[in-house]
Image (cartoon, rainbow, N blue to C red):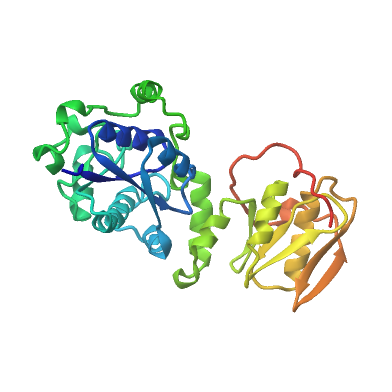
């Protein structure tokens, strides 16, 4: 008789890796499911799957996820984290993939009480029910604290070999990781940028100034890069903070986003989100100068318009106080951007 197949939501973190390993130890065949998201902190999930020796399915959360973020049915947590709706959304995707891969049930690395909004016992039951997976979601790390699931009742999983972890403590999980020899997981904690107050401010700014039908996953990905300055309702400027971010901004140039970059000095690349024009260009040049390695010393920048390259000397002397709003960004190393070879 072939082994029972289970589908696990795998984030790249420790808890989901431990849950998978526990079921593998009980003789189940585990398939991992990773849902790619522009708001996730973790990405090294393939190394985790390889270490566990499991097949990995990858799906995108897509544009439907952005609609959920704008108007979550059950509201937000402390920041722009709609944890309950997000879990229901993810489990809905998992339910479809479960059928595709012929799995009998879904499992996760959730720990009861670890996250206040979405991992209370009653909330876990509500999420399973709303996702159409009532009785079919096993949480191996906390199973003995939760109602018995179908896999346990049918004997596919031995409940006595599952755990009763609760709350935010990490000691038990770290001990298990050492015992199992797991090393590819990312550091515990975090995992979702929506719980970060600074990222939430930038996401709210995006939603406030961009209609839903014109907001893309790439727009949200851009929020992870650079210093963001809201100039007016139709204009935002993003500056690179390092050579790597400058390169990333170059790759994100699209219709409606245009680049201004240094020619003969070390300074940040600017990605301008909004219409072209003389006023916008002056704002951009002032910011590039202010955040260059040697502000006020001059230099030239270039941009492309109508297929033609244009250059202009900087206009030093613009004060950062002249800009209406700099949106919060994640901490970056102190000092000017990393050196960028002029081209």
Quadrant of residue 316 in the image?
bottom right
191 is higher (above) or lower (below) than 92: above
Asked which quadrant contains residue 161, the reply is top left
Q: 160 or 47, which is in the foreground?
A: 47
Above or below: residue 90 compared with residue 168: below
Q: Position of residue 235 (x, y in %)?
A: 63, 66
Judge whether 66 appears above or below 25 on screen: below
Residue at point 75%, 52% (across, down): 268
Q: Quadrant of the N terminus?
A: top left
- Can you name the residue that lies furthest to the left here? 153
Point out residue 87 in the picture as x, y percentages from the top left corner: 31, 50
Q: Is residue 22 visible?
A: yes
Answer with left or right where residue 308 lies relative to residue 17: right
Q: Position of residue 294 (x, y in %)?
A: 85, 46
Q: Is residue 230 left or right of residue 42?
A: right
Against 129, residue 157 (above or below) is above
The tally of labels here is 0
Taking the spot 48% from the left edge, 54% from the top edge, the residue there is: 38
From the viewer's perspective, tell me whether residue 123 is left or right of residue 242: left
Find the residue positioned furthest to the front: 1
> Quarter of the image containing the C terminus?
bottom right
- Observer-nearest of 224 and 202: 224
x and y, in percent, of residue 23 in the image = 26, 35
Residue 112 in view of the camera: no
Q: Quadrant of residue 111?
A: top left
């Amino acid at each position: 008789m072939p082994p029972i197949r289970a589908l696990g939501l795998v984030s790249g973190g420790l808890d989901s890796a431990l849950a998978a390993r526990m079921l593998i130890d009980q003789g189940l065949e585990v398939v991992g499911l990773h849902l790619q998201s522009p708001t996730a902190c973790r990405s090294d999930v393939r190394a985790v799957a390889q270490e566990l020796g499991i097949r990995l399915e990858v799906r995108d959360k897509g544009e439907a996820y952005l609609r959920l973020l704008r108007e979550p049915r059950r509201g937000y947590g402390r920041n722009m984290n709609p944890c309950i709706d997000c879990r229901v959304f993810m489990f809905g995707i998992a339910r479809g993939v479960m059928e595709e891969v012929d799995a009998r049930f879904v499992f996760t690395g959730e720990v009861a009480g670890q996250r206040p909004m979405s991992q209370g016992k009653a909330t876990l039951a509500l999420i399973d029910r709303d996702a159409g997976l009532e009785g079919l979601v096993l949480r191996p790390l906390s199973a003995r604290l939760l109602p018995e699931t179908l896999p346990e009742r049918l004997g596919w999983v031995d409940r006595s070999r599952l755990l009763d972890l609760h709350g935010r403590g990490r000691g038990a999980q770290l001990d298990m990781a050492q015992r199992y020899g797991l090393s590819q997981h990312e550091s515990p904690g975090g995992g979702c940028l929506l719980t970060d107050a600074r990222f939430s401010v930038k996401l709210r700014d995006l939603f406030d100034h961009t209609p839903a039908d014109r907001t893309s996953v790439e727009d949200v990905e851009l929020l992870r890069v650079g210093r963001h300055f809201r100039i007016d309702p139709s204009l935002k400027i993003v500056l690179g903070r390092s050579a790597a971010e400058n390169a990333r901004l170059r790759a994100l140039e699209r219709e409606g986003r245009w680049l201004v970059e240094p020619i003969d000095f070390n300074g940040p690349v600017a990605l301008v989100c909004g219409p072209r024009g003389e006023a916008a260009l002056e704002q951009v040049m002032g910011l590039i100068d202010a955040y260059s390695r040697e502000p006020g010393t001059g230099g030239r920048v270039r941009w492309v318009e109508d297929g033609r390259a244009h250059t202009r000397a900087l206009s030093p002397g613009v004060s950062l106080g002249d800009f209406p709003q700099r949106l919060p960004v994640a901490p970056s190393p102190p000092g000017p951007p990393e050196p960028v070879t002029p081209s």
